[in-house]
Amino acid sequence: MKTLGLIVNPIAGMGGKVGLKGTDGEETLARALSLGASPESPVRAGAAISAIASHSDEIAVVAPPGQMGEEVLIASGLKPHLLPLVVGESTSSADTKTAADLMLGQGIDLLLFAGGDGTARDIVAKVQDRVVCLGIPTGVKMHSAVFAVNPTRGGELAAAHLFGAVKRTRAAEVMDIDEEALRAGHLSARLFGYMTVPYRQGHVQGLKAGSSEDERYAQESIAAGIMTRMERDVAYVIGPGTTTAEVMMAMGWDFSLVGVDLVRNGELLGTDLSEGELLELMGDGPGGIVVTPVGGQGYLFGRGNQPISAELIRRIGKDRIMVVATPGKLATLRGEPLRVDSGDPDTDRWLAGYYQVITGYRDRSVYRVSAA
């Protein structure tokens, strides 16, 4: 007998059709209701459960009472064991977290939850990687890689995992954005953790990569932050990439998108430079490096920016390296560390450690760098 846990966020997705970008916070929910929003989550959760209901004799089901799971299951012909949780007319993030916490003591084989990024964020805060989870997409924001591509596929995948047809799992990112900032036209995303999810190609969505407008805004924000950190009379090596290109554009200079450039005091010293040219133009003065990892691979040095050699890195110093990346690019690493492959193993070992990654004007993430 397998045990399935179900948590439904009944208000997830209500802000979508009325243009509110989500329903985080009591004020936003009240506004959504005043604009005529109706619950979306129970219907979509029911579509997922219908794919599991035919196995009712083979599974035990655990859920919070009422609208947080019980009602959906009963409507699908399943009788759940109820968690000791009081669910009122309105639910909150705290209710989701409490339900997730209680699930850990129920010996469940899979935790199925209906909601969006905020729901995933609440659940991962409690379960971490201690139980396999899968999201039924019912929210407005679903940037995270923990959701099925649709409710039906989610139900199919849940059943396949429970009964051994799908044994593969993977660590998937839980991302969430600031809804207030989004409503104001700005994207501010954070990585909140990783869930272990069952995986079958075509059933689980990938991590949301920002649209070109979203990514461009994040890059512009990073560039503005970099310019405030640049010191006078320091020659900065600007590595290749669209994020670092924004730094050059912010200073009003041409740039080599796939090459290495050099600036000092806001003036361009050279573009698409070789290692020798960089060393010569820098002279004996202080230097710095602005570099972004290769998307999907995470290499800081040794992939596409070989002019930034081990000698140059040693000369400048590891404490003068500024690593920049949009949250979306970091998320593509799927928990893998940033890597260095400078061609000199001693330099790579010297570079290894933890670095601040600049992800916005004032935003930072701490990330581990490993020798390749």
Image (cartoon, helix red, strand yellow):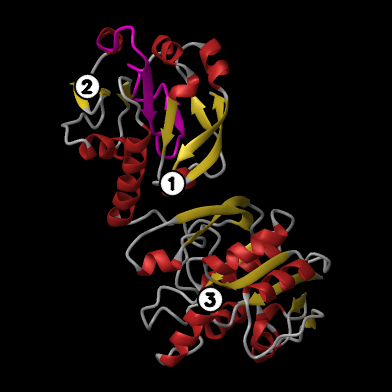
Label 1 or label 3, whichever lies nearer to me, is: 1
Within 10 Å of the Cα at label 1, are there few (<14), some (14-19), or many (20+) other Cα atoms? few
Q: Secondary structure at mark 3?
A: loop
The residue labelled by disc 2 is: 272
> From the viewer's perspective, is 287 left or right of 346?
left
The quadrant of the picture occupied by the N terminus is: bottom right
What amino acid is found at the position of numbered circle 2 in the picture?
A: Asp
Towards the viewer: 209 or 179: 179
How far apart, in angstroms, are the residues tagged by discs 2 and 1? 29 Å
The residue labelled by disc 1 is: 362
Towards the viewer: 55 or 117: 117
Q: Contact, CB < 8 Å: mark 2 with mark 1?
A: no
Residue occupying image coordinates x 43% and y 46%: 362
Label 2 or label 3, whichever lies nearer to me, is: 3
Find out whether residue 334 is within the magenta segment: no
Q: Secondary structure at mark 2?
A: loop
Label 2 or label 1, whichever lies nearer to me, is: 1
> From the viewer's perspective, is 55 left or right of 346?
right
Magenta-colored span? 281-308
Q: Is residue 270 visible?
A: no
The residue labelled by disc 3 is: 25
How far apart, in angstroms, are the residues tagged by discs 1 and 3? 24 Å
Question: Which numbered marker is on residue 197?
Answer: none
Of callouts 1 and 3, which one flags the residue occurring earlier in the amino acid sequence? 3
